[in-house]
Amino acid sequence: MIEVEVNDRLGKKLRIKCLGEDLIGDFKKVLALQLGVSWNKVVLQKGGAVLKDHISLEDYEIHDGTYLELYYL
């Protein structure tokens, strides 16, 4: 289990528990449930690069304590 911190720069900071082998799309679905928005309107970025839904957290080198930026479409 890892814990990833997500910040939308509008005052919302969340810590999401997940597995490293989870796909970004699955991670966005869990995040969207907590935010109360549609998961396909969520865009995640790490270091300015947009994360694609079909790639796992491990493949993006997202580990425990990693910080992700959250944007809405």
Image: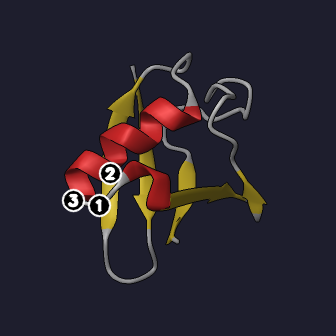
Instruction: Pick the residue in front: 36 or 47.
Output: 36
Asked if residue 5 is positioned above or below residue 71 in the image, the reply reads: above
Q: Which mark is residue 32?
A: 2
Given the image, on which type of amino acid does mark 1 rest?
Answer: Val
* Tags 1 and 3 touching, CB below 8 Å: yes
Given the image, on which type of amino acid does mark 2 rest?
Answer: Ala
Q: Judging from the image, what secondary structure is the residue with disc 1 in?
A: loop
Classify 10 Å Cα crowding around label 3: few (below 14), some (14-19), many (20 and above).
Answer: few
* Tags 1 and 2 touching, CB below 8 Å: yes
Q: Judging from the image, what secondary structure is the residue with disc 3 in?
A: loop
Distance from the alpha carbon under mark 1 to that under mark 3: 4 Å
* Tags 3 and 2 touching, CB below 8 Å: yes
Taking the spot 64% from the left edge, 25% from the top edge, the residue there is 56
The residue indicated by pointer 3 is: 36
Distance from the alpha carbon under mark 1 to that under mark 2: 5 Å
Query: Residue 16: where, in percent of width, then height?
Result: 34, 41
Taking the spot 65% from the left edge, 58% from the top edge, the residue there is 45
Image side of residue 19 versus residue 31, left or right:
right
Q: Which mark is residue 37?
A: 1
Kindly indicate the quadrant of the structure image that contains residue 28. Answer: top left
- Please state, as top left, top right, bottom left or bottom right, where the N terminus lies in the image: top left
